[in-house]
Image (cartoon, grey):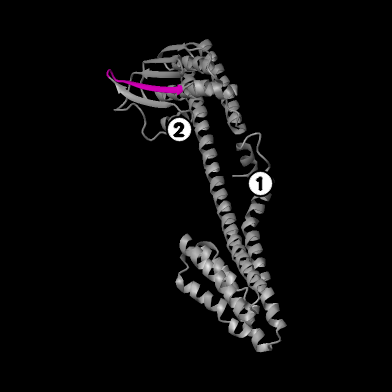
Amino acid sequence: MSRRNQNLLAGPGHRPAHTDDEGTRALRLAPKLANLVVGIVFCCVGLLAFVMVCAQGLGPLAVFGALTCLIALFVMQLGLFGSRAGRCGSGYLAIQAVLAYLPMLAFGKAWLGMPGFLAGTALLTLPPIRAAAVFVLIVASTGLLQWLFTGFTVDIAYTCVVTVITALVVYGSTRLAKLVAEVHANRARLVETAIAEERGRFARDLHDLLGSSLSSITVKSELAYRIAQQNPARAQTEFAEVLDTSRQALADVRAVARGARELSLDREAQTVRSLLSAADVTAYVEIDCAALPPAVSGVLATVLREGVTNVLRHSAAGRCAITVRRQESTATIEIVNDGVRGETGRDETGTGLTNLSVRVAEFGGTLHTETLPGNRFRLLVAVPVREHAVTEAA
């Protein structure tokens, strides 16, 4: 579908396609940006430890070993992204524990910041109670190690605080990156759902509008063709109505494209009278209801249009009774016709009643069909009125 058609389908409030593309590109960058921020945080924490190791002057071999361990820790932390984090077992934590504690034999207190990564991993991968216990043990172990290295109370407190901060930064940053990715994925699903719903709405509107209009054009054209020579004046009248119907169909299609489709119940009642008369169907139309909210009137008009279209398409009707009533907070429309073909009087491969069911359900209404004695078919739709009236008044 072209961009022009997509903009047309979305209605007058739709933004240009290139604006949506820019917004989509910006949202696609969000997960990548979150991952980049997390990676920078990890690199900065690891860089501090690496600088402290280098400051001890332990030689190139020790520096290379420290860099190797830091890279391994960095890779393991990045491995927590995505779905793999929930499947990290005790072996994963054990390897990271070795990388967090064992290098202290060579680098001493310069490596005391690394257990914070292990504490963060525990918070991410273990059940809450076990994670809290492991977290406390790791913080306490860094305090104990600092006491063995220096013995100063201030250094012990500082080391414990740094470990807590590092763990929370690792946990928070990783969780944030995951949440950003989840929000992005959910938005993509919502966009797909909205597109599917819009396509369904457009298809239902086209079916409801064009189905009736084309049926009317067909019936009236056939009638005019049959009587063209015997009754030219009547044929001319029918052709004039065909022209009006085709113009109305064009206007309806444009209204659907703009998302501003509105139907008048009274106008539809006049239309179906003329249509049934042209098809030699005796019509009894009774509209006994006070002023209805536009939304309710529109859905009843849609039911009337589609119901009469089905009568002409799927039955050999000679009579059709249409009744519209309002009883307190409910408006009902009933269409009863004879000349049922088969058991149901409807083409099971059609989508008319299915579309109507969806549309009526959107308004909180109900749709019921049944075959009656005497080879008759009944369509009954009930739509609540009070809530729609309140909504529109608000």
Which residue is depicted at the point 53% across and 62% down?
82
In percent of width and height, residue 376 lies at 32, 20
At numbered mark 2, what does the secondary structure look like: helix, strand or loop? Answer: helix
First to last magenta residue range: 373-383
Mark linked to residue 358:
2
Q: Can residue 280 be seen in this view?
A: no
At numbered mark 1, what does the secondary structure look like: helix, strand or loop? Answer: helix
Q: Residue furthest left?
A: 373
| Distance Cα–Cα, label 1 vs label 2 | 29 Å
Q: Which of marks 1 and 2 is nearer the N terminus?
A: 1
In percent of width and height, residue 69 lies at 60, 79
- Label 1, residues with CA under 10 Å away: few <14, some 14-19, many ≥20: few
In percent of width and height, residue 92 lies at 49, 72
* Principal secondary structure, stretch drawn in magenta: strand
- Judging by the rendered image, the residue that carries numbered circle 1 is 20
Q: Which of 205 and 134 is in front in this view?
A: 134
In percent of width and height, residue 262 lies at 57, 24
- Residue 282: which quarter of the image? top left
Q: Which of 148 and 203 is in front in this view?
A: 148
- The C terminus lies in which quarter of the figure? top right
Give yes or no for residue 269 being in the magenta stretch: no
Check the image and report above or below for 256 versus 159.
above
- Residue 366 as seen in the image, left or right of residue 173: left
Which residue is depicted at the point 43% across and 17% down?
279
- The N terminus lies in which quarter of the figure? top right
Q: Which of 313 and 261 is in front in this view?
A: 261
Q: Nearer the viewer, residue 241 or 146?
A: 146
Give yes or no for residue 375 being in the magenta stretch: yes
What type is the residue that disc 1 sits on? Asp
